[in-house]
Image (spheres, rainbow, N blue to C red):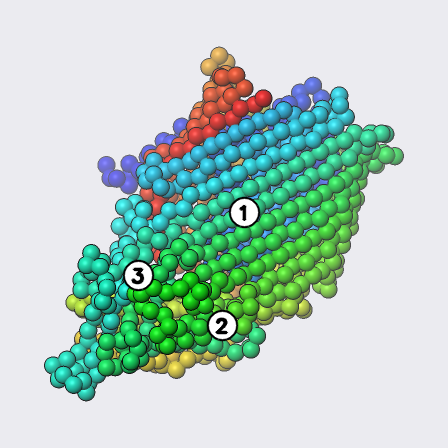
Amino acid sequence: MSKQLILKKSVIAVALTLVSSQFFPAYAQSSAQAENKGGVEKVVVTGSNIKRGADQETSSPVQVISREEITAIGASTVKDILDTLTANTGALTDLGGGNSFASGASGVSLRNLGKGSTLTLLNGRRISNYGFADGGQETFVNIDTLPTEIIDRIEVLLDGASAIYGSDAVAGVINVITKREFQGVTLKGGARQSLVNSVMNKDQTASITAGIGDLRTDGYNVFGNLEAFHRSPYSDRAIEKSVPSWYTDYVNPSFGVKSSYSYPGNYVGRYPANYADPALAGKSFNTPAPGCAPENITGGLCRFDQYDRLGAHAEAKRYNFFGGGRLNLSNGMQAFSEVTYSDTTTSYYNAPPIMQYTGSASTWYSVKDQALKSFTEPRLPVGHPNNPYSFPVELRYRYADDPNMFKSVAHAKQYRVMVGLEGSDYGWDWNTAVGAMASTADNQIRGPKHAANYLAAVLSGEYKFGGQNSAELLNRMFPTVVFGGETKQVFIDARATRELMALPGGPLSLAIGGDFRTDKFNAYVSDNIANAEIVGYGAINVEGSRHMSAAYAELNAPLTKALEVNGAVRVDKVGQTETSIVPKVGMRFEVTRGLILRGTVAQGFRAPNAAETGKVALSAFQNSIQDPKRCATAQAMYAVLNASSNPLDKADALRVRDSLGCATSFAVSTDGNAGLAPEKSKSYNFGVVLEPTRDLTLTLDYYRIERRNEIGTKSVDQVLSSEDGVPGSVQRAPVSADDQAVAARVKELSGKDLQFSVGRVSALSQRYENLNKTRVSGLDMELTHRWNLGSAGRLSSSIRANYQLDYRSWDTVTNDYTENLVGTYENYRYNIRATSNWKKGAWNVGGALTYLPGTKLITDKYDQRYTAQGCEDRNFPADYCKLDKDYVVDANLSYAGFKNSTILFYINNVFNRAAVVDLRASTSIPPVRGRTARVAYEYKF
């Protein structure tokens, strides 16, 4: 039997074990139904403002992650919880790197439509967006700021809901619902660590929840929850043995190899043709600088272990607080308040910067001057105290005077303060609140070079290579650069519901409401970036504000006991953009007991945010872009250099292939556009709910979302591929001295005359436009079952799955939809999660399986790097030119047999599955994975 067949059978066996008996229903109404057998409680379910019987299925699909499921996941963070959603794709993680525009944050994206099209709520109301906009454009909620232990449940509306909630609810809504009241004191702590490598995946959590007062007897309740989270960092060197061989063979062959850019460095170059010693004239040389320790010399070069410093895992410290209070007033009124506060710090550790002479200028865009800036790394001139030669010489050097100074620290604070009243008068149930929220964030980075100060210190000899240099000098050469952002919002809202009249199926119900918000967003950089003084660093400067007002109405009509129809309409006015009127209609039809048909048709919108319409000046670097006019030549040069026996040629081979053509970097400037129109969408959702028995439920829903007027910029790959047809869209530098030197070396080695026909891309200039569309469709399925085993306990299981039928974005070059992108890189055809849990007395044992199919490596038809031919050209094995299927099995166990105590134990990745081969994996974050354990302890007073 083949290994592949054994693997397939093992996966199937695990899945069958997990679903041998199915989990309790996980839609919103089921838990309430189970808890209210004597009488049906009326509740508000995410996706509607109308109260309804808790045992009633709605026309929209709502997935509920219960407190019990959250505990079984063993989540340390809200991100851990939401990562289990099969509809959550394309999310953001704070591990992405310290140089991104949204460093230090995590976000969620339903239907792969982006974080800006998924609305995240806390107890049904908006929370502040992160202080940074991802990519300088996309505003989103940082889910790392939300507490976990105070959560009662998370309701996920898998349907468009702009008619209910307004802007952003295009792909769906995630509503984090906390406990309504709390009494007593609960302490909880936990720790996680890899069982494969002790330094990996280490984090610790601690929380305290305390509350006093009983609403029924005392008339009030006040409680608070404080949580602390710490994730330990580790270096690449610490996990070197855990890094898979395919990664070092094909993705990052230099991983783990000590760098020739070292301290005190290496002299490299070529003697002049007219050198005094004819025996040396024209010959290349590489010599360690004086002072290099013998143990650091390898292959005739002085080496530096940069991987002992580079951090594959960022350190994180988070403190989250949630407080709530309720007070019964006269005439059935109740006052309520909520306070949230978070403080997060994420530290990314970097290797010390290097001195790397290439002869080519690094370019970046000055927003202030509206012009390109350039910087060329110098050679040490004749007469320099560190130049022992009679001609200018290249020194490959690492500025390791104080390695600990080079890091990026993203720090953010966020809060929401809200007070409100609710009650019942004249047949209306009403609720109103007023509040304020804000988020501030800054990312302080050490390591970039100050162009003028750096050149002055190097060329004058003030900086002593390999010697003692003052902190003041280092601070001038490598100053702290800062990216900052702030968002503020003040809001007031009100809503009311009532029953209008009796219909054959129940009461005709109406909900009305409105809200008003002011929103401000600012993004800024330190003066040294704003003045274009820092090599390679683009700037962002955004000043924007807007007023947002809305009114809405919703009607629910149970025409018969079997047929219920509902509709909603919302009118929004956001800033200077056009008024948006978005309707939604839904239907629920109970064909027979145990069989329900449901469906919705809705429109949606996303208003342009201040980062897109305000006074925007954004300049950023695009990395790893294939230049279609240079890549083939760079690839041919790589083949020659890589075959050389000279270690310097081999070291340069990857640089030549990637930096000079196949994975190049350049500046892209983007301007705001006050004339942007809102993004618009249409969504369709039709499904069936089958409940043949009380304990078995199947839901199957088809969805289709069409979004137009998408705000964005043209794809860099698309612009480059059509460069000749769009004059002025691409700026190129002349063929450089570095290009010519590489060509000369290749000719010297092989006799081949390989020349670049054009220079490197130096810049692209764009602005935000309404130019894109996206069309997605698919199926959501959930199968749940409960099995009462009598004296043997209870077994509950579920399977949740998302199956993508179609995903098409807009091609701005052909002015048409792209091909179906389902099955392209990380755009998975389906996503499956199966869980099973057995409970008996104080014991609780469970497991979970997550399964993803394989995909291609290409992202679209323009992506030529990872086609079959592209992989062959780069000498990648054909079997590696795809992303293989992947699965992970987790297990959990808890025991609550001790007084007031619960002990919890978790194993993630039970079978110790390594990461699948991914030739597109990040060269800065090695794909290490393995079995991990987490233990937690909870004590209740």
The C terminus, quarter of image? top right
Q: The residue tagged with tag 1: helix, strand or loop?
A: strand
Spot the residue most to the bottom: 274
Question: Are there few (<14), some (14-19), or many (20+) residues within 10 Å of tag 3?
Answer: many
The amino acid type, in three-letter code, at marker 1 is Thr
Q: Vertical placement of 788 versus 260: above or below?
A: above
Distance, label 3 to label 1, CA atoms, is 41 Å
The amino acid type, in three-letter code, at marker 2 is Glu
Q: Vertical placement of 866 versus 755: above or below?
A: above
Residue 935, position as x, y percentages in the image: 43, 30
Q: Which residue is mark 3?
A: 871
Question: Are there few (<14), some (14-19), or many (20+) residues within 10 Å of tag 2?
Answer: some
| Image position of 899 (left or right of 631) | right
The amino acid type, in three-letter code, at marker 3 is Cys
> Which numbered dot is residue 533?
2
Distance, label 2 to label 1, CA atoms, is 29 Å
| Image position of 636 (left or right of 181) | left
Q: Earlier in the sequence, mark 3 or mark 1?
A: 1
Which residue appears at 47% of the width and 41% of the height? 230
Which residue appears at 53% of the width and 38% of the height? 228
Residue 351, position as x, y percentages in the image: 37, 58
Q: Which residue is mark 1?
A: 344
Residue 909, position as x, y percentages in the image: 38, 36
Residue 784 visible in the picture: no
* Proximity of marks 2 and 1: CB atoms separated by less than 8 Å: no
Distance, label 3 to label 2, CA atoms, is 40 Å
Q: Earlier in the sequence, mark 3 or mark 2?
A: 2
> Which numbered dot is residue 889?
none
- Front position among marks 3 and 2: 2
Between residue 450 and residue 756, name the one nearer to us: 450
Q: The residue tagged with tag 2: helix, strand or loop?
A: loop
Q: Earlier in the sequence, mark 2 or mark 1?
A: 1
